[in-house]
Amino acid sequence: MNTEKTGRFIADLRKEKNLTQRELADLLHVSDKAVSRWETGRGFPDISSLEDIAAVLDTSTAEILRGEKIEQAMDDEAVKELTRSSVSLVQELLQKRSIQSLLTGFLVSLILFVLAVVHLNSPVWIQDPGDVLQVEELSDGRVVAVVNCPVSGWDLQDVDFEGHKETFFSCYETVLDRWTGRSRAQMILLGDKEDLERVYYYPGEEWDRLIYSQTDAPDYDGVETLPRLIYNAWTFMGACASLLCLVVLFLMRHSRYRDIMLKVTALPVSFTLSLLAVLAGRRSQVYDAVYYLSGILIVTVLLYILFLAVFGMYRKRKRA
């Protein structure tokens, strides 16, 4: 079987029908580039689309495979040769498709694996543990925080505010430590008494809680945190991108471009739905951006794969 001969045959039949490559592509729900590859011998139609091509061009699949009109009945030897060529072509195409599927599957699995590792090892900041967090002054002048709940680690940040040194203390846990039981209670050094003025636990139930101060000071009244602003921005951008793509999809006229645009539209829609699903009911909390972003991307990839699978099944049923 000669792909160049088959390509010229398809081109001749198309021209007899007074069809352009784009018009033929629209009838077959493929791209005009695909038709161009067929006609130049740089590609070959999918086996499942041969019947559609034959129907559109008023020919038979056997003639397309052979690349010429069959004017008279073929003898047994010609039939056997056409069958061997067809089987060989199918095996070659299936092998190429199998390799492409393996590479695609490996790439998607690698992306999901990396995202899962990042997600499991990213810190989840623990909200104010209340009475199980105690601050004590040691006899040598050091100040420690005793956290009687499982934590993976902690973070201390000093901020100069209106001439005062304020220290923000946070504890976190990772999903992997929680699953493996590596999280444990901790005694954490906050610093020397002479170097500490005010220490706040972050995040609190509503605002950051003052847990240590050498002078009387009101509780910190809190601010809108950066992670919350980031998630608000992500939600806004995802919703805008989804709406824009839906409008373009609605205005699209050519069915081939609609299919492509539908796949493009599914991406921001999947991201927006994943974002809302992951953050649902947790807007009052302070998040770790890496932890939640990795989780959102994992759900986005899974939703998009599900969409492609359903869309592929729909296309096959529609062609049938």
Image (cartoon, grey):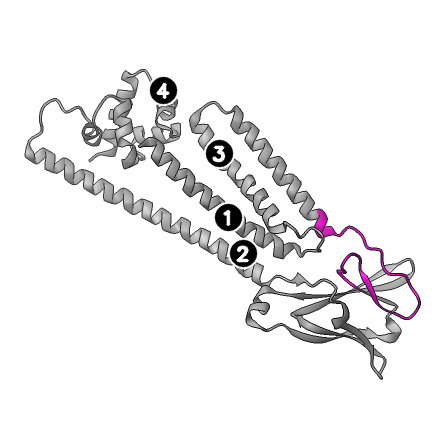
Q: Indicate whether 16 appears above or below 181.
A: above
Residue holding disc 4: 20
- Nearer-N-terminus badge (4/3): 4
Q: Magenta segment: does it hold 217?
A: yes
Q: Which residue is mark 3?
A: 262
Identify the element where label 2 is drawn. helix
In the image, what residue type sits under mark 2?
A: Leu
x then y, percent, for residue 260 = 46, 33
Q: Amino acid at mark 3?
A: Leu
Residue 290 drawn at (x, y percent): 63, 56
Q: Residues within 10 Å of mark 1 (few under 14, many from 20)?
A: some
Q: Secondary structure at mark 1?
A: helix
- Compared across the picture, whether 115 is left or right of 316 comes to right
Depth check, mark 1 against mark 4: the one in front is 1
Give the alpha-carbon distance from disc 1 to disc 4, as whole Å: 37 Å
Quadrant, the C terminus = top left
Kindly identify the residue that appears in the image at 27 percent across and 16 percent down: 16
Choose the circle earlier in sequence order: 2 or 3. 2
The first of marks 2 and 1 along the sequence is 2
**Farthest residue toward the bottom?**
139
Residue 301: mark: 1
- Mark 4 or 3, closer to the camera: 3
